[in-house]
Amino acid sequence: MRFRHNTPDAVWLQAVGEKKWIVLTRDAMIGRRHLELDALLSARARVFVVVAKEYTDEASGNIIIAALPKILKMLDESRFPFIARITDSGTVNLWKTEPMRRKGIKVKKRR
C-alpha cells in the first residue's frame, strides 16, 4: 500500500495499524505533535524513528540495517503502540509507549 506525501497522518497511521505494519521514519516530531500522537496511539502503531541528523537515505538505511536485531527484539518484547528512537550508533530505545498516552485517548486492548 502506498500513501501520497500529503495523506493525513490519521489516515495512513490507521491503515498501518490495521495491517500491523511497522513505521520507519526520520520524522522526530511524530511523537511531539498531538494530532499525530493521538492517531498513532489510536491505530496502535509501532514506530521507529531514526534520530540521526542530516543523513542521506543510504546512511539512514545502513543505520536501520545495523539496528535490525534490536528492532526485532523490541517488536517481540514490547507492548504496542510505541515509538522507539534509533540513533546513529544503532542504539534502539523506547521513547513513548501506551501508558504515556494523554488523558482522554481511548485505545482498544488487544487480546
Image: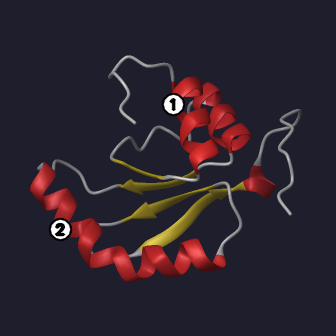
Q: Amino acid at mark 1?
A: Trp
Q: Residues within 10 Å of mark 2 (few under 14, many from 20)?
A: some
Residue at (76%, 52%) from the top-left corner?
100
Sequence order check: which comes first, mark 2 or mark 1?
A: 1
Task: Give the secondary structure at mark 1.
Answer: helix
Tell how many labels.
2
Give percent across and percent down for residue 33: 56, 30
Is 16 positioned to the left or the right of 60 in the image? right
Nearest to the observer: residue 70 or residue 19:
19
In the image, taking residue 24 as reference, residue 77 lies left or right, namely right
Question: Does any portion of residue 88 appear in the rendered image?
Answer: no
Position of residue 2 measured from the top left corner of the image (x, y, whole percent): 35, 32
Q: Residue at x 56, y 24 (%)?
A: 11
Classify 10 Å Cα crowding around label 1: few (below 14), some (14-19), many (20 and above): some
Left or right of 111 on screen, residue 2: left
Looking at the rendering, which quadrant does residue 87 occupy?
A: bottom left
* Quadrant in which the C terminus appears: bottom right
43, 93: nearer the viewer = 43
Q: How is the image coloured?
A: secondary structure
Q: Which residue is mark 2?
A: 62
Nearer the observer, 81 or 55: 81
72 w.r.t. 3: above or below: below
Q: Can you tell which mark lies on residue 52?
A: none
Residue at horizontal 37 percent and vertical 16 percent from the top: 6
Q: Amino acid at mark 2?
A: Asn
Disc 2 + disc 1, Cβ < 8 Å: no
Q: Quadrant of the N terminus?
A: top left
Q: CA distance from mark 2 to mark 1?
A: 25 Å
Occupied quadrant, residue 36: top right
- In the foreground, 50 or 64: 64
Q: Which residue is mark 1?
A: 12
Q: Nearer the viewer, mark 2 or mark 1?
A: 1
